Image (spheres, rainbow, N blue to C red):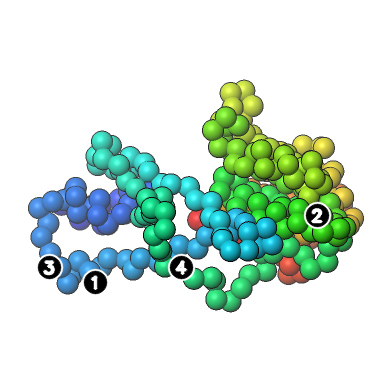
Amino acid sequence: MELQKLADIDYNSKVASVRLPLIEVFRRFASVKIPLISFLSISPIIQPRLYSISSSPSMFPNTAHLTISILQRPEAMYDKNQTFTGFVSNYISNIEENNYIFGFPKPHGSNFHLPEDNETPIIMIGAGTGLAPFRAFLQERHVKLRNGEKLAQALLIFGCRNPNHDELYAEEINEYLSSGALTAKYVAYSRVENNKMYVQDRIKQSDCKDMIWSLFHEQSGKVYVCGDGAGMAKGVIQTFKDIASEFGFDGEEYLRNALKELRYLEDVWA
């Protein structure tokens, strides 16, 4: 009866919304016995994990860096003393030096890359490991500057929980500020006492908002958003609509056109 209730009444709240793994269900209902072939027929196929490369081939021609969050959390429902570990992230974190893993580049390429025209300003917005492609962007810009190329301005808005724990690549990013590869950086901390802020909140503040509008609208720049698609990315795109409306445009139409023109680009995940 309890299993039937979970499958019918409680499915959305206790399975779908918390992404309850099938193995947790069978651990809870250990008395359930099914043939292996039946188990395999209902088990989801493991999907490839797609990671943004967080290094520039101009700076690291023979290696590709990844920025990965290692998933380890209490089991979702039945046994808080058990730890759920992310399958691929933990596998990668335990690989020893000189061992191999199988991978492949995304076959159809991506629009999520630096503009071909160095005179196009860029606005990079991300949280957590969403910083990955922007580290690669900044490395590439750093090399271009070193080679004497002139670059448009670049703005980074980054969100993390606490500057003492997860402000990724902070020292390296500051080096790019010093070199000019990065023009300005704004950081939003979501777990600092009395100052909880997300990237969409930081964008709304006048100093950041005015610079974004100047680069994006007045100078026809490009916006790149990377990270959590369910929360952060939705909040950011709504903030951009609000800003466009504040400056006298139809926010919905303005962002629809920017997406169509590939001036507002997303690399997000659920």
Among the two numbered marks 2 and 3 on one chain, the one whose residue lies closer to the N terminus? 3
Q: Residue at x 36, y 41 (%)?
A: 73
Q: Report if the CB atoms under discs 2 and 3 are less than 8 Å apart.
A: no
Foreground mark, 4 or 1, reads: 4
Distance between the alpha carbons at the discs numbered 4 and 1: 26 Å
- Per the image, the residue denoted by label 4 is 103
Among the two numbered marks 1 and 2 on one chain, the one whose residue lies closer to the N terminus? 1
User: Is 64 in front, or is 191?
Assistant: 64
Q: Residue furthest top?
A: 194
Q: Residue furthest front?
A: 98
- Residue 220 visible: no
- Per the image, the residue denoted by label 1 is 41
- Residue 215 visible: yes
Distance between the alpha carbons at the discs numbered 2 and 3: 63 Å
Q: Report if the CB atoms under discs 1 and 3 are less than 8 Å apart.
A: no
For residue 35, which numbered disc appears in the image?
A: 3
> As shown in the figure, which amino acid type bears the numbered disc 4?
Gly
Q: Position of residue 60 (x, y in %)?
A: 63, 59
Among the two numbered marks 1 and 3 on one chain, the one whose residue lies closer to the N terminus? 3
Dot 2, crowdedness within 10 Å: few (<14), some or many (≥20)? few
Determine the secondary structure under disc 3.
loop
Determine the secondary structure under disc 1.
helix
- Per the image, the residue denoted by label 2 is 146
Question: Within the image, what quadrant is residue 217 found in?
Answer: bottom right
Distance between the alpha carbons at the discs numbered 4 and 2: 32 Å
Foreground mark, 4 or 2, reads: 2
Q: Residue at x 68, y 49 (%)?
A: 125
> As shown in the figure, which amino acid type bears the numbered disc 1?
Ser
Q: Report if the CB atoms under discs 4 and 3 are less than 8 Å apart.
A: no
Dot 4, crowdedness within 10 Å: few (<14), some or many (≥20)? few
Dot 3, crowdedness within 10 Å: few (<14), some or many (≥20)? few
